[in-house]
Image (cartoon, rainbow, N blue to C red):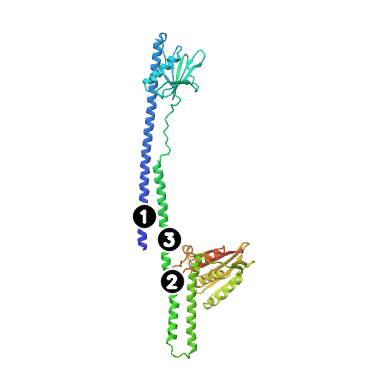
């Protein structure tokens, strides 16, 4: 897929997700506004119901008082206090004479039924001579039948001279409208769904970009591999054609020269193919390390001996400083030698003009450190994050002065990890790079 197409897809996807988030935000705001309005209406209804209940109870108790007065001729003409609400669910009515409990109960039930009051209530009669509630009952009208029992709630006293009776509604509390949980279940699940969509979208973008990069890397690898294989194949073809066209085979020196060219290029071709095959085995976990006790300085000296001639031919320098007090560790000789060989090969290939390479080895109580430092082209911080990825090569534009498949450092990293070690790099553009390999003793 072309870069432009990927950018268009990502751009449109971002617009869609932003639109979805905005739409969800508007829905949340509208729902909150609706619920706040609903709560306000509920509060107003609750206040209205409370006020209406107080009015009905007051009127009913006034009616009870009036009928009690009509039954008591001596109470006529005496000034009586009105019905008073002591608390939100406790009402008292003053009366200056003794009261009949059964008559009082019948009158209260009658008046409550007239005003459609079905709340269970308790009533008590206060005796001013004994300063106590002498009669208290619990009455339940909710079932449509009168059910009375002894009250279990201590009747509150009222600071009043004379007889009075009180009516208490134990189940009648202030209606409290909860303002919490404004976001409904629907909003909760839609928010969860939105989060899932965002996660899936992010993962999809990452996968698309990763696949795009993988495609570019593979294309680059194929191009490099084609170029690397084409050169020895062409050389072998030319040399073999020369030998086939020779009519005089008496010039043995010339024949030997072309035979050596074919042999060298064939070995080079075989090495490149073997490198790719080794990486395939490494990915499949088929590479088995044959660990043995190794001397790190011995391996380094062997690698340095191989590269000394190459560096000297380029008028470069290759220095080795061993600071190890313990040189031996367990590792695979072939693979670990290849690790150091790859690091020295890169330091030689990526020099500016003249290679300057410094190798240092030292150890701590747990393992050995090998530092391969060069003063070559160096890398940017972004490039150092990717150099251990398979097929990755530092971009050089249209210049192809450095050959390779982008597999060397990936191989190095995998082998070092297989030895339970690690590799780190410090690099700066135009100032060179320093690779530090650590392997434990055991």
Are there few (<14), some (14-19), or many (20+) residues within 10 Å of tag 3? few
Q: Earlier in the sequence, mark 2 or mark 3?
A: 3
- The mark nearer the N terminus, 2 or 1, is 1
Residue at image point 44% right, 72% down: 225
Image position of 57 (left or right of 328): left
Q: CA distance from mark 2 to mark 1?
A: 35 Å
Q: Which mark is residue 210?
A: 3
Q: How many marks?
A: 3
- In the image, which disc is placed on residue 13? 1
Q: Are marks 2 and 1 in contact (CB under 8 Å)?
A: no
Which image quadrant: the N terminus? bottom left
Seen from the viewer's position, the closer of residues 375 and 441 is: 441
Q: Residue at x 53, y 77 (%)?
A: 310
| Residue 320: image tag | none
Residue 90 in picture, x, y percent from top left:
45, 22
Where is residue 314 shown, x and y percent of the image?
Answer: 51, 77
Q: In the rendered image of this protein, does residue 91 appear above or below residue 22? A: above
Mark 1 lies on a secondary structure that is helix
Q: What's the CA distance linking mark 2 and mark 3?
A: 21 Å
Which residue is outermost to the top?
74
How dense is the environment of label 1, judged by Cα within 10 Å: few (below 14), some, or many (20 and up)? some
Task: Report the quarter where the C terminus lies.
Answer: bottom right
Is 265 above or below relative to 327?
Answer: below
Where 248 falls versus 111 (above or below)?
below
Task: Look at the numbered disc 2 and give the secondary structure of its residue.
Answer: helix
Note whether residue 82 is visible.
no
Question: With 41 as the anchor, is 428 left or right in this view?
Answer: right
Residue 325 in picture, x, y percent from top left: 64, 66
**Label 2: few (<14), some (14–19) or many (≥20) C-alpha neighbours in 10 Å:** some
Which residue is label 2 attached to? 224
Say which of 370 and 172 sits in front: 172
Q: Position of residue 137 (x, y in %)?
A: 47, 19
């Amino acid at each position: 897929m072309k870069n432009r197409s990927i950018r268009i897809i990502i751009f449109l996807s971002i617009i869609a997700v932003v639109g979805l988030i905005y739409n969800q935000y508007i829905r949340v705001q509208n729902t909150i506004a609706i619920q706040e309005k609903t709560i306000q209406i509920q509060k107003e209804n609750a206040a209205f119901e409370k006020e209406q209940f107080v009015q009905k109870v007051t009127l009913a108790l006034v009616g009870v008082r009036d009928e009690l007065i009509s039954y008591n001729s001596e109470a006529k003409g005496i000034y009586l206090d009105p019905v008073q609400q002591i608390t939100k669910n406790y009402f008292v009515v003053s009366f200056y004479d003794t009261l009949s409990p059964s008559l009082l109960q019948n009158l209260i039930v009658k008046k409550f039924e007239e005003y459609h009051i079905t709340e269970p209530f308790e009533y008590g009669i206060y005796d001013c001579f004994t300063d106590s509630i002498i009669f208290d009952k619990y009455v339940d009208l909710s079932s449509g039948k009168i059910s009375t029992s002894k009250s279990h709630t201590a009747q509150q006293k009222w600071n009043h001279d004379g007889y009075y009776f009180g009516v208490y509604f134990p189940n009648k509390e202030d209606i409290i409208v909860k303002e919490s949980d404004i976001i409904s279940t629907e909003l909760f699940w839609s928010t969860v769904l939105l989060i899932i969509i965002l996660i899936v979208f992010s993962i999809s973008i990452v996968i698309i970009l990763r696949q795009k990069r993988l495609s570019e890397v593979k294309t680059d690898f194929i191009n490099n591999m084609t170029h690397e294989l084409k050169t020895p194949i062409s050389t072998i073809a030319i040399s073999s054609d020369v030998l086939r066209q020779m009519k005089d085979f008496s010039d043995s020196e010339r024949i030997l020269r072309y035979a050596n060219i074919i042999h060298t290029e064939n070995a080079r071709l075989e090495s490149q193919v073997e490198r790719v095959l080794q990486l395939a085995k490494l990915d499949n976990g088929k590479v088995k390390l044959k660990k043995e006790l190794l001397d790190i300085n011995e391996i380094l000296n062997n690698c340095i001996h191989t590269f000394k001639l190459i560096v000297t031919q380029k008028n470069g320098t290759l220095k080795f400083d061993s600071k190890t007090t313990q040189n031996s560790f367990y590792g695979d000789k072939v693979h670990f030698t290849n690790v150091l060989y790859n690091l020295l090969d890169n330091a030689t290939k990526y020099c500016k003009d003249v290679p300057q390479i410094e190798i240092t080895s030292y150890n701590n109580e747990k393992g050995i450190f090998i530092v391969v430092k060069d003063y070559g082209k160096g890398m940017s911080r972004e490039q150092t994050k990717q150099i251990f990825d398979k097929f990755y090569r530092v971009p050089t534009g249209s210049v192809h002065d450095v050959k390779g498949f982008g597999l060397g450092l990936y191989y190095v990293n995998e082998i070092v990890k297989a030895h339970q070690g690690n590799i780190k790099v410090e690099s700066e553009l135009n100032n060179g790079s320093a690779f530090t390999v650590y392997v434990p003793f055991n």
